[in-house]
Image: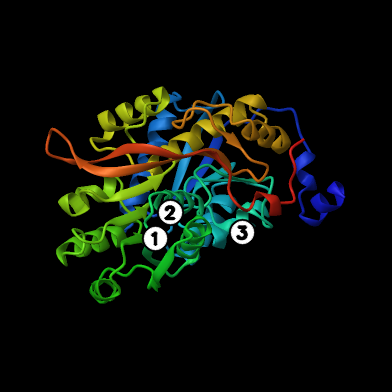
Amino acid sequence: MKAKWLLAAGLLPLFATHASAADKVKIGLITTLSGPEAVMGNPMRDSANLALSMLGGKIGGLPAEIVFGDDQQKPDMGRQQAEKMLKKDKVNFITGMLGSNVLLAVYRQVIGAHTILISANAGPHQLAGKMCSPYFFAMGSQNDEAPEAMGHYLIAHHVDDVYVMAPNYAAGHDMISGFKRTYKGKIAGEVYTTFGQHDYQAEISQIRAAKPKAVFVFYPGGMGIQFVKQYAEFGLKKDIPLYSVYTVDPGTLKAEREAALGNYDASFWGADLDIARSQQYVAAFTKKYHYTPPNYGAVTFDAIFAIDSAVKAVHGDLSNKKGMIAALEKANFPSVRGNFAFNTNHFPIENFYLFTVVKTADGKESLKKRETIFTAHKDAYASECPMTKK
């Protein structure tokens, strides 16, 4: 049955190997480098460059180059960048993938070319379940998981009436699905807004009228900046606490400022985690770029070191896809999350934390870890993935 599945998926070329080291490793990194959402994409680019510099410009001991592509947060542009990287640049790996909409658009294109694809952010449920592939790894988390953590936290703290909101696209629907998987209280309202929307006055008026005990949102990047600021400006914050995922991070906080004070956010990583590798990364990043990295950057940093471990494992033989995939499955590289493992579907098994926005001694806003919500958490879709560990 296993051989039949591999044949049906077009994956048998995975097992052809040639014992010869390549001359150079080329990594394609697709993310959003322009527009309001570049607040998330730029740290990914900066973290990749930092990682490569810490590796002496080499991946697995071979000279290396990172080719960057701006998807402009558009699926069609993501496909164009992937095609260029595969056909013209001849990259050996593709990483990045800020948005789930872009990742889903390029997924079959990349794995169909038998190129290893490592998402450094997006984790749509389809790719954790039935559409999983040996060629695909999610380095961050599955989209549902951080909302699952927040839903669990809220119900455990007897917050039994919540209004939920997210953008109307793949990740937005995953986030709300994840939240509702663990949150068993009343959903006072469930609203999906236009992707890229930057005015939420009408929606905030609806929240005021609904009078929930709390609001849960997923609004990454520029969308989050506008929502958080307007939520505070309209005076809801003092009466209706705001809980979120991937809405408040060191990048968006520079614009959200005091509007975000006291807000809560759940994630698998934060810049203040007491993990040696994480502290090393944050120190090196802030020294080089003069700002605090968000989780998007941290995962990209991990992705480059994961690729390094894979190329080392095959002694530079980039045709040995089976060997590189086996090495990646071991997660045998220094991670900003400390110890973590990949599940059978190539999504991480990792911790999730609650963070709150506080003002530091120097007068700046910062995310501070408050507690661990989940330990060694697994996503809800792994059982649907046809892959099994050897």
Crowd class of label 1 (few under 14; some 14 to 19; many from 20; radius 10 Å): some
Q: Which of marks 3 and 2 is nearer the N terminus?
A: 3
Is 10 left, or right, of 59 in this rendering? Answer: right
In the rendered image, which quarter is residue 163 located in?
bottom left
Crowd class of label 2 (few under 14; some 14 to 19; many from 20; radius 10 Å): some
Is 84 left, or right, of 127 in this rendering? Answer: left
Residue ID at (59%, 41%): 92
Looking at the rendering, in which quadrant would you find the C terminus? top right
Q: Is the residue under label 1 in contact with that under label 2 (CB below 8 Å)?
A: yes
Which numbered disc covers residue 160? 1
Residue ID at (28%, 44%): 356
In the rendered image, which quarter is residue 279 located in?
top left
Residue 219 on image: x %, y %: 35, 60
Disc 2: which residue: 155
Above or below, 182 relative to 200: above
Answer yes or no: is residue 55 visible: yes
Q: Is mark 1 on a helix, strand or loop?
A: loop
Disc 3: which residue: 126
Q: What element carries label 2?
A: helix
Q: Earlier in the sequence, mark 3 or mark 1?
A: 3
Camera-side mark, 3 or 2: 2
Camera-side mark, 3 or 1: 1
Residue 126 on image: x %, y %: 61, 59
User: What amino acid type should be assigned to the residue bearing mark 2?
Assistant: Ile
Crowd class of label 3 (few under 14; some 14 to 19; many from 20; radius 10 Å): some
Q: Which of marks 2 and 1 is nearer the N terminus?
A: 2
Instruction: Decide which of 352, 184 is in the foreground and name it.
Output: 184
